[in-house]
Amino acid sequence: MIIHPFRALRYNPERVHLADVVTQPYDKIERQMQAAYYQKSPYNLVRIIKSRETEVRGDEGYAAAGRLWAQWIRDTVLVQESRPAYFIYRQKFLVADKFCVRHALVGLLDLRRSQRVLAHEQTLSGPRGDRLRLIRQTESNEGLVFLLYRDSTSRFRNIAEVAHDRAPLESVTDEFGTEHETFALKPEEAGFVDGVFEDGDLIIADGHHRFSVALQFMQECETKGWKPAAPESFDKRMVAVVEMSDPGLIILPTHRVVFGIPQYLLASWEEKMSARFEKVEAASLPELMEKLNHSGPGSFGTFSLDAQAVWIRKQKPEPEELDVSILHLEILAKTLGITGQQVAAESKIRYFRDPLQAMQEVKRGSGQLAFFLNPTRIEQVEACAKLGRVMPQKSTDFFPKMLSGLLFMKMEIVKS
């Protein structure tokens, strides 16, 4: 079995109001969000996963976060379920005024079978080091790794029916209006999980750094001679698995605004583009986005102070060829001289989910040129992962994000 039930640790509803303590994933918590979370509650999870202490006190800050975590457990701010279970995680949300629902199965992934898990994004040393320093102190999983799975048995798709017409174990609406609910499965209800994950690959949607760190921490523990003392230990990782045909599986595009480009490159980029792309002008941003949506793979919208247009690649892309890869390799690199190192450092590019914000960035003079993309398709993510290809940064924006703070896994370890 690759996905296991577990005795989850949860916030104690007698001690806290759930809306005051949950957070967005740690890598999405910006400075303003961090401050808001700190104000909400002395038990808000930000004090562990994005602590101010770690920013100013280094290793001692991570140790302080670990001590605070242990204190919350001692003080029953966090309590553990008495029996192992799988959990259903349901999210209800709006995208472009359309109501959507997404279901995930939450359990523990057996890290000793990690060869079944495929990644599609590079991890960076900074975030890896940060998460490793934290897990050494808490010996817990405080956030989910979001996995995708193509179910050939069709049984996993029944997950929505299991949660239908049932009161949730916990429910909270986040600051972006998404409703998050969890449900604990009874042993007799978990039969549909048996054998489902034995064939096919699991693909990381979100949480590449968390997964990488879980593997590294397991290796560290084994090197020290430590042993798992329960199913909840360092050889497992808390994950949420979504079936790829789930109607609520939404990927949003991430648009780019470039800045700091030498003027001589800007003056000649359209001429260089014309060798590979056809240009279709647009009179407004809504018209541009509509034309982009109907132009198919290999198409990009652009906005500058002088013009806005859709550029359509003359050579039709291969099915597994990503628009974002074409943008980075054929446009940003070849026409604007932006190197891979500059992309990684975000020294020439800013990223925006909202096309209007990207356009305004150029109008304010903070950017020189905005590029708009169509969303990456789930089939492309699957194909790239199976081919072992690494996508550029910000290739996928799975919406909404999975909250941190609904469920936790506390490791039990025999330390020799």
Image (cartoon, rainbow, N blue to C red):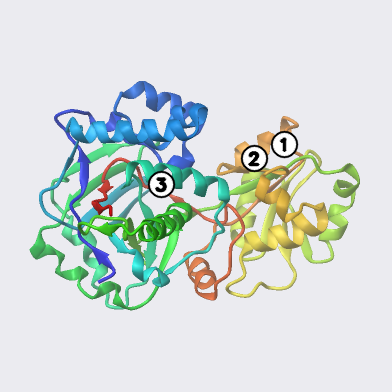
Residue 227, image x, y percentages = 27, 59
Quadrant of residue 262 in the image? top right
Which residue is labeled 1 in the image? 362
Residues tagged 2 and 1 counted as in contact (Cβ below 8 A):
yes
Secondary structure, mark 1, is helix
Secondary structure, mark 3, is loop
What's the residue at 27%, 43% (across, down)?
Answer: 406
**Distance (Cα) linking label 2 and label 1:** 7 Å
The mark that comes first in sequence, 3 or 2, is: 2
Picture layout, residue 346 above or below residue 374: above
Quadrant of residue 315 in the image? bottom right
**Distance (Cα) linking label 3 and label 2:** 21 Å
For this orientation, the residue located farthest to the front is 416
Which residue is labeled 3 in the image? 401
Which residue is labeled 2 in the image? 358
Quadrant of residue 241 in the image? bottom left
Q: Which of marks 3 and 1 is in front?
A: 3
The mark that comes first in sequence, 3 or 1, is: 1
Picture layout, residue 26 above or below residue 191: above
